[in-house]
Image: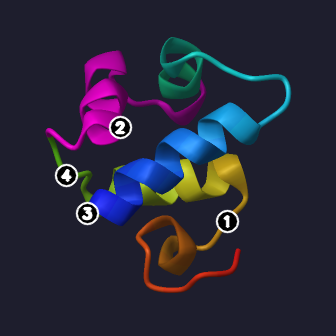
Amino acid sequence: MNEFRERLRRLREEKKPVRSMAVVSELCGLPRSAVRKYERGEAKPNMTALIALADYYEVSLDYLTGRVKYR
């Protein structure tokens, strides 16, 4: 899951305009603390959270979770 947290942080920083974790959590319908913990590697998201994040960043689940290198 280390790859996941790095990709999640990178995607948030690359998205224009750059969004705070609070904004991302609101737009994805996730608790702010959850998104923070995902980026820090302190928690693992469930499938619902993974889908919400992948949809928001417009990437595949495979890319988000580190299974493939390309978006």
Question: Is residue 23 rendered to the left or right of residue 8?
Answer: right
N-terminal of the two: label 2 or label 4? 2
Q: Amino acid at mark 3?
A: Met
Identified at 30% across, 40% down, the residue is 38
Residues shaded magenta:
27-42
Q: Which residue is mark 3?
A: 1
Quarter of the C terminus within the rendering:
bottom right
Q: Magenta includes 41? A: yes
Disc on res. 59: 1
The alpha-carbon separation of the residues under discs 3 and 4 comes to 8 Å
Q: Position of residue 46 (x, y in %)?
A: 24, 56
User: Residue 10 occupies which quadrant of the picture?
Assistant: top right
The alpha-carbon separation of the residues under discs 4 and 1 comes to 18 Å
Q: Amino acid at mark 1?
A: Val
Q: Which residue is mark 2?
A: 39
Q: Magenta includes 37? A: yes
Labels 3, 4: front one:
3
Q: Which residue is mark 4?
A: 44
Identified at 56% across, 26% down, the residue is 24
N-terminal of the two: label 1 or label 2? 2
What secondary structure characterizes most of the magenta part? helix
- Who is closer to the viewer here, 16 or 23? 16
The alpha-carbon separation of the residues under discs 1 and 3 comes to 17 Å
Q: Amino acid at mark 4?
A: Lys
35 versus 69 height, above or below: above
How would you rate the neighbour count of disc 3 (Cα within 10 Å): few for under 14, some for 14-19, many for 20 or more? Answer: some
